[in-house]
Image: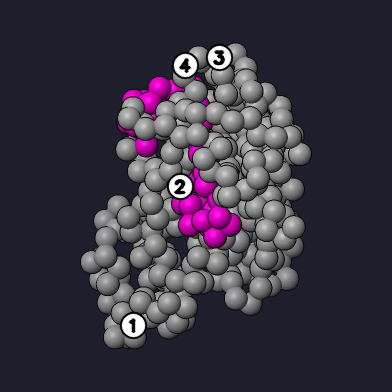
Amino acid sequence: MLQKGDKAPDFTLSATPERSVTLSNLRGKNVILAFYPADWSPVCSDQMTLYNEMLKYFEKYNAELLGISVDGAWCHKAFAKVRQLNFDLLSDFEPKGEVSRLYGVYDNGISQRALFVIDANGIIQWSYLSPIGENPGADGIIKALEDIKSN
Amino acid sequence: MATLTPAVSSQDHTLGPKDAAIEIVEYGDFQCPFCREAYYIIKQWLDEYENRFRFVFRHFPLTEAHEYALDAALSAEAAGRQNRFWDMHDAIYDDQPALNDGLLVRLAKTLDLDLHKFSEDVEDKSLLIRVNDDFESGVRSGVNGTPTFFVNGKRYNGDYKDIPSMFPR
């Protein structure tokens, strides 16, 4: 798993069936990557519901949140619609798990529940691997963003 | 890890003695069915164990998921301005299945609040800031869903129904 100080590997992934997101296009902003095992499973849903509430706080830190799992773009679309999520869920679908592998958080066919906070220059400033069944909350993310802000 | 920040202060809504050996803080959402379940359980503890613990409620409205959660939190705060926070807190949970904006005003009426003051206070920006401050403190403290409980400042990760086993005899 990539750690603080590592350069965040660039990627382009689908955010919707029609639109993709490239990490390097977000230079100048802090980026939060939230890898998670699957749409619809109960813990992820709570985690993504929580992050959805957090968007205005992330904005205060000039940070953009991206969720990533191996689910397809249409699955993400349905999931985001039902949960009314207002941030992008990226599909690490083809080749399956490629980006999760780059970040060292791919295991047994799914993304692990892992968080990365990447600064405006594309350097990882914080990463955290959560037990897969545990919702890691957002306290670590906020602390990492505060540390970036104060440096 | 997962420590309550900031600690309980005179700003908080509390029940029970200040010097109780056990202090329980709940981060809750008025539209969350699991919080409603917890409400009935804690109510029972308050009856059964009265002075053996202190209970504190902080707001954690999931406003994107629950349409009336924020309005309900603001209504409880507005009632608090008339020293009726806990009555409104209880009334909202009791009637949670019927929660909407109309219900909140009806509850204010039932509690015999000054309705003019109530409707002004619900719109008062400082109450919104207070609710948001609670939410932010929850996030910083490691709240990851509702309800989340802290016992004596530490997040309680087990089944909260077991908390009374910690109460002093």
Give the mark toward the camera: 2 or 4: 4
Q: Secondary structure at mark 1?
A: helix
Residue hosting label 4: A94
The amino acid pointed to by label 3 is Gly
Q: Chain of mark 4?
A: A
**Residue contact at pointers 1 and 4, CB within 8 angstroms:** no
Image point (37%, 40%), residue name: A83
Residue B120 badge: 1
- How far separated are the C-alphas under marks 1 and 4? 55 Å
The crowd level at tag 4 (other Cα within 10 Å; few <14, some 14-19, many 20+) is: few
Give the mark toward the camera: 4 or 3: 4
Image point (49%, 72%), residue name: B129
Residue hosting label 2: A52
Q: Is residue A65 magenta?
A: yes
Q: Secondary structure at mark 4?
A: loop
Do circles 3 and 2 both sit on a common chain?
Answer: yes
- How far separated are the C-alphas under marks 2 and 1? 29 Å
Do circles 3 and 1 both sit on a common chain?
Answer: no
Image point (51%, 72%), residue name: B130
Q: Position of residue B2 (x, y in %)?
A: 70, 50
Image point (74%, 48%), residue name: B1
Magenta stretch in the rendered image: A51-80
Q: Quadrant of the C terminus of chain A?
A: bottom right
Give the mark toward the camera: 1 or 4: 4
